């Protein structure tokens, strides 16, 4: 699955987004219906720094959140968080280096606090990005209830 996430992000194979999001939405829906987890109130994609977006041409996390939001009838709140500091690419960094790289890289906007947020990204490798995003959202008064990623390399 991590390979497919790289195909989306690096090779711009955006046609992979619908079937992958369909599978994630189906699983998520089953978890809600079983009562295992609550349905979030909003999806928040991990933002890119404004200097990186023109290089890639799209933010994969926004595309994923939009696709999931449509399938699950959830609002996408890409206005709650910004990446305020450019960082180096993470793929060759250790977990500790990733955490240092992302320190203070994200900030919540002045939006009213939202409860029950699900943070959306493509892959969780060490959890450093999700942790940095969650910390920034919490500082802004928001409550994170879940994380949604297409793939995870994290140990259980």
Image (cartoon, rainbow, N blue to C red):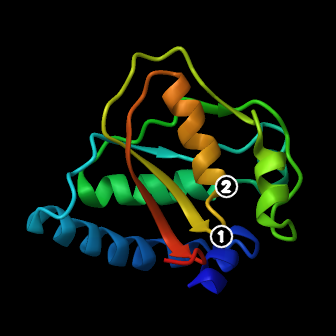
Residue 151 in percent (x, y) is at: 53, 75
Residue at (11% x, 62% y) in the render: 35
Element under label 2? helix
- Pick the residue in front: 137 or 70: 137
**Residue underneath mark 2:** 128
156 relative position to 97: left or right? left
Identified at 59% across, 66% down, the residue is 124
Callout 1 secondary element:
loop
Residue 79 seen from this side: no
Query: Would residue 25 be seen by someone viewing this image from the given angle?
Result: yes
- Name the residue rendered at 49%, 72% in the picture: 150
Badge 1 is on which residue? 125
So how many labels did they put on this image? Answer: 2
| Circles 1, 2 touching at the beta carbon (< 8 Å) | yes
**Residue 155 placement: quadrant:** bottom right
Height in image: 98 above or below 138?
below
Label 1, residues with CA under 10 Å away: few <14, some 14-19, many ≥20: some
Does residue 24 sit above or below 74 in this rendering? below
In this picture, residue 141 sits left or right of residue 28: right
**Residue nearest the observer in this picture, 40 or 101:** 101
Q: What is the x, y in percent for residue 79? A: 52, 29
Q: Give the CA separation, mark 1 to mark 2.
A: 8 Å
Q: Provide residue 91's location: percent of width, then percent of height.
A: 81, 69
């Amino acid at each position: 699955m991590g390979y497919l996430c790289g195909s989306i992000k690096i090779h711009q194979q955006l046609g992979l987004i619908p079937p992958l999001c369909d599978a994630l939405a189906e699983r998520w829906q089953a978890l809600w219906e079983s009562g295992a987890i609550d349905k979030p109130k909003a999806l928040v994609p991990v933002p890119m720094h404004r200097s990186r977006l023109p290089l890639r041409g799209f933010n994969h996390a926004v595309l994923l959140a939009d696709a999931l939001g449509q399938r699950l009838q959830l609002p996408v709140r890409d206005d709650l968080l910004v990446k305020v500091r450019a960082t180096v690419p993470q793929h060759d960094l250790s977990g500790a280096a990733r955490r240092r790289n992302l320190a203070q890289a994200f900030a919540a906007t002045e939006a009213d606090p939202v409860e029950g947020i699900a943070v959306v990204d493509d892959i969780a490798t060490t959890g450093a990005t999700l942790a940095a995003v969650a910390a920034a959202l919490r500082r802004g008064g928001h409550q994170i209830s879940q994380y949604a990623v297409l793939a995870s390399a994290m140990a259980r």
